[in-house]
Amino acid sequence: MSAMTRRARIMAATRRQRADKLPFFHYWRHSQVGWAERDCRNRGMGMNWARPPYTTKMHGVEISESRALIAGEAVIRRTYSTPVGRVYEDEKQEPGVGQWHAMRSWKDVLPWQTERFIKTPEDYRVLKYIVENTEYLADYFPIEQAMDWLGEDGVVLDALPHSPMQMLMIHWVGSEGGRFFFHHADYPDLVEELYQAVSKSREPLYEIAAHSPAPIALCGDNIDGVLVNPNLFRKYFMPQYEKQANILHQRGKLMAVHMDGRIGILKDLIAQTPIDIVEALHPPPMGDLPIGEALALWPDKIIWVGFPGSVYVLGPQETKKFALELLRDMGPGERLAVAMSTENLVSNANLQMLTAVLEQADLPLTSEKIDAIERAFA
């Protein structure tokens, strides 16, 4: 029997079917290009690519950019002017932004906001106007192009933005110093109104994603139980996942949500969601939910494991040791795939070492098979 392709392995596991080997892949946005990446791909590593299936058009909104020097630091100031007022954000960019993957710097650092759009209660009205006057338009060319380029080497995903409340928590208000939580307590009506406006405006976007040719929609978010407590998750996140899933599932589309944080406190609530793929679940030491426990808790869900960056810092030998321990926690290895990284670059040496372990992970996994992999390094 011929070996499965990388794409076939990932999709078999994601459809709860038996793959011949444990699927493992890198994300394009973090991947180096060169001899080590080529070597690992030749040995079974897939390449996944998240691209948007849409463009946006804003009506009655003028956007201007200028460079500013704030507290001695150069930033890009982006101003949105509307009939009801204007808001601005300041963005700091490291060298390489716009010249490398996914708008990241040479060091794989995303631009970060040093000033958020929402600073005062008055800014909520402006953001609400922008949200209500944003039109989502289908554009499947990025998806089709990536699928053509990748072929059977990996999977293309629809890249969707953060869910409505995380737009406030992460982008517009920010959580630094507890800012979002102060706003949520001091201006509950304004927060609620903006949340509802984003929720309604996103409905056409989910329809667009449902009709795209990509098999999986990656629904943004950065779920961590410290940032998103159970009450917030229950009130603002679970209804959104229900809404997205109802639309996506009607077209046979699988739904993934990025949950790479400490989610032990949310594990029982996550079990109640219609999410198909818990994407980027980081086991301890970075996360707080072991893979074996997650598999038992979520029998109807697929887990894409994010290999912990804190292990990579310790070097190739610790990477090998942790990878073997991870295999021992996976049971037979069903409903699983491993992402080499979901957040950061991986050194050539670590990438090759992890590949050296995972390329031998024939399914179903057994203790005897894992022992044999370990002996191969002796």
Image (cartoon, rainbow, N blue to C red):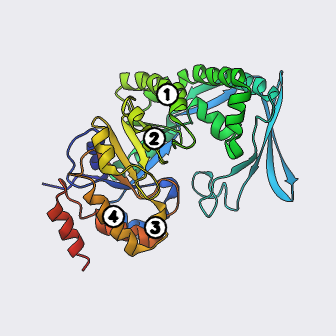
Image check: 59 left or right of 227?
A: right
Which disc is residue 312 wearing? 3
Q: Helix, strand, or loop for circle 3?
A: helix
Residues packed near mark 3 inside 10 Å, few (<14), some (14 to 19) or many (20 plus): many
Residues packed near mark 2 inside 10 Å, few (<14), some (14 to 19) or many (20 plus): some
**Label 3, label 1: how far apart the Cα atoms are:** 34 Å
Q: As shown in the figure, which amino acid type bears the numbered disc 3? A: Tyr
Q: Helix, strand, or loop for circle 2?
A: helix
The residue sitting at the bottom extreme is 378
Among numbered discs 2 and 4, the one appearing first in the sequence: 2
Q: Is residue 192 above or below residue 120?
A: above
Among numbered discs 1 and 2, the one appearing first in the sequence: 1
What residue sits 23% from the left and 60% below the top?
Answer: 361
Among numbered discs 3 and 2, the one appearing first in the sequence: 2
Which disc is residue 323 wearing? 4
Q: As shown in the figure, which amino acid type bears the numbered disc 4? A: Ala
Q: Nearer the viewer, mark 1 or mark 2?
A: 2
Residues packed near mark 4 inside 10 Å, few (<14), some (14 to 19) or many (20 plus): many
Question: Which residue occupies the foreground of this view, 176 or 140?
Answer: 176
Q: Are marks 2 and 4 in contact (CB under 8 Å)?
A: no
Q: Are marks 1 and 4 in contact (CB under 8 Å)?
A: no
- What residue sits right under mark 2 in the picture? 265
What residue sits 33% from the left and 50% below the top?
Answer: 291
What residue sits 53% from the left and 25% below the top?
Answer: 235
Q: Are marks 1 and 2 in contact (CB under 8 Å)?
A: no
**Label 3, label 2: how far apart the Cα atoms are:** 26 Å
**Where's residue 249, x and y in %?**
37, 25
Q: Is residue 225 above or below residue 36?
A: above
Which disc is residue 214 wearing? none
Q: Helix, strand, or loop for circle 4?
A: helix
**Where's residue 74, x and y in %?**
82, 56
Q: Nearer the viewer, mark 3 or mark 1?
A: 1
